[in-house]
Image (tube, grey):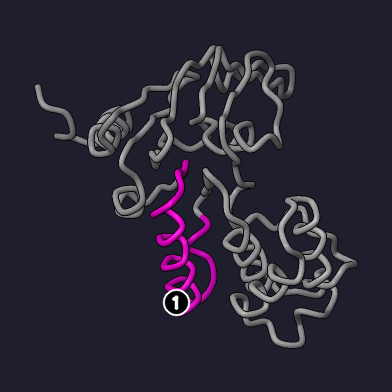
């Protein structure tokens, strides 16, 4: 379960106030996979980072009774001077999982060969995505946070990543940010729409998609 309590986030940019979240109150139940929708710039990724704990709210708080992942496939925390394997070992220690098991899992998943033992700073974007996705899938969480990440890599890698992620969703919750409505329908059973600082939560994902398309001006999405 994830609960937002009077969650507020305000940015100041070029002297202008940008209200991303205006006293949000919502509950994402245990076992639910929530599709987080909204127009570009609405603050979806910011909200995801606040849930992950990598961005702080201006006020209010987020409460959870389970473990929450970092955004799936996020590679921004890897140290460029450490090898892929060393970065994975460091992550294993942080999250209290068996280091050798995680290193072996990521080696098999990412299929980087000898590059696994080369500095992360030498990796191509595709290699970074493989390593990051392997780490994300190698550590089990109660809730996974997803920000458009299962579209990375070549077709074969995407298929594998999506199969493994679907398996994780059989046992875990998720909050998913995506502009792909087929992906949202495939992964999610609930929906939430962030618009102008306000969050509307829907028990049915199709209702969330319809509301999102309505505010985006897509015709014939909500009946008269």
Q: Residue furthest right?
A: 81
The quarter of the image holding the C terminus is top left
Q: Position of residue 125 (x, y in %)?
A: 67, 69
- 224 or 147, which lies in front? 147
Q: Residue at x 58, y 54 (%)?
A: 140
Q: Residue at x 78, y 59 (%)?
A: 78
Q: Residue at x 47, y 41 (%)?
A: 175
**Residue 175 showing in the rendered view:** yes
Q: Is residue 154 above or below residue 114?
A: above
Q: Position of residue 39 (x, y in %)?
A: 43, 35
Q: Is residue 60 above or below residue 93?
A: above
Q: Characterize the local packing of mark 1: few (<14), some (14-19) or many (20 or more) Cα atoms within 10 angstroms.
A: few
**Residue 35 showing in the rendered view:** no
Q: Position of residue 162 (x, y in %)?
A: 43, 65
Residue 73 quadrant: bottom right
Residue 108 quadrant: bottom right
Q: Is residue 145 above or below residue 56?
A: below
* Side of 195 relative to 206 (left or right): right
- 15 or 122, which lies in front? 122
Look at mark 1 in the image and give the residue it sits on.
Answer: 155
* Side of 81 relative to 76 (left or right): right
User: Disc count in the image?
Assistant: 1
Which range of residues does the magenta coloring cover? 149-176
Q: Residue at x 24, y 36 (%)?
A: 218
* Side of 175 relative to 84 (left or right): left
Q: Secondary structure at mark 1?
A: helix
Q: Position of residue 173 (x, y in %)?
A: 45, 44
Residue 164 lies in the magenta stretch: yes
- 97 or 56, which lies in front? 97
- 12 or 2, which lies in front? 2
């Amino acid at each position: 379960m994830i609960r937002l309590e009077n969650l507020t986030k305000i940015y100041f940019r070029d002297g202008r106030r940008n209200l991303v979240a205006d006293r949000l109150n919502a509950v994402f139940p245990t076992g639910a996979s929530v599709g987080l929708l909204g127009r570009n710039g609405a603050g979806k990724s910011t909200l995801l980072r606040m849930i992950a704990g990598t961005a702080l709210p201006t006020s209010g708080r987020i409460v959870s009774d389970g473990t929450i992942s970092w955004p799936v496939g996020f590679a921004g925390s890897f140290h460029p001077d450490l090898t892929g394997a060393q970065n994975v070992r460091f992550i294993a220690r942080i999250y209290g999982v068996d280091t050798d098991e995680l290193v072996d899992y990521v080696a098999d998943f990412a299929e980087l060969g000898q590059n696994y033992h080369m500095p992360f700073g030498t990796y191509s974007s595709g290699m970074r995505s493989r390593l990051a996705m392997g780490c994300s899938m190698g550590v089990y969480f109660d809730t996974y946070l997803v920000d458009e990440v299962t579209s990375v890599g070549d077709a074969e890698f995407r298929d594998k990543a999506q199969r493994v992620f679907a398996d994780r969703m059989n046992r875990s919750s998720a909050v998913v940010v995506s502009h792909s409505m087929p992906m949202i329908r495939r992964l999610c059973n609930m929906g939430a729409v962030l618009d102008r600082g306000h969050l509307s939560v829907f028990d049915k994902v199709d209702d969330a998609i319809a509301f999102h398309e309505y505010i985006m001006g897509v015709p014939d999405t909500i009946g008269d």
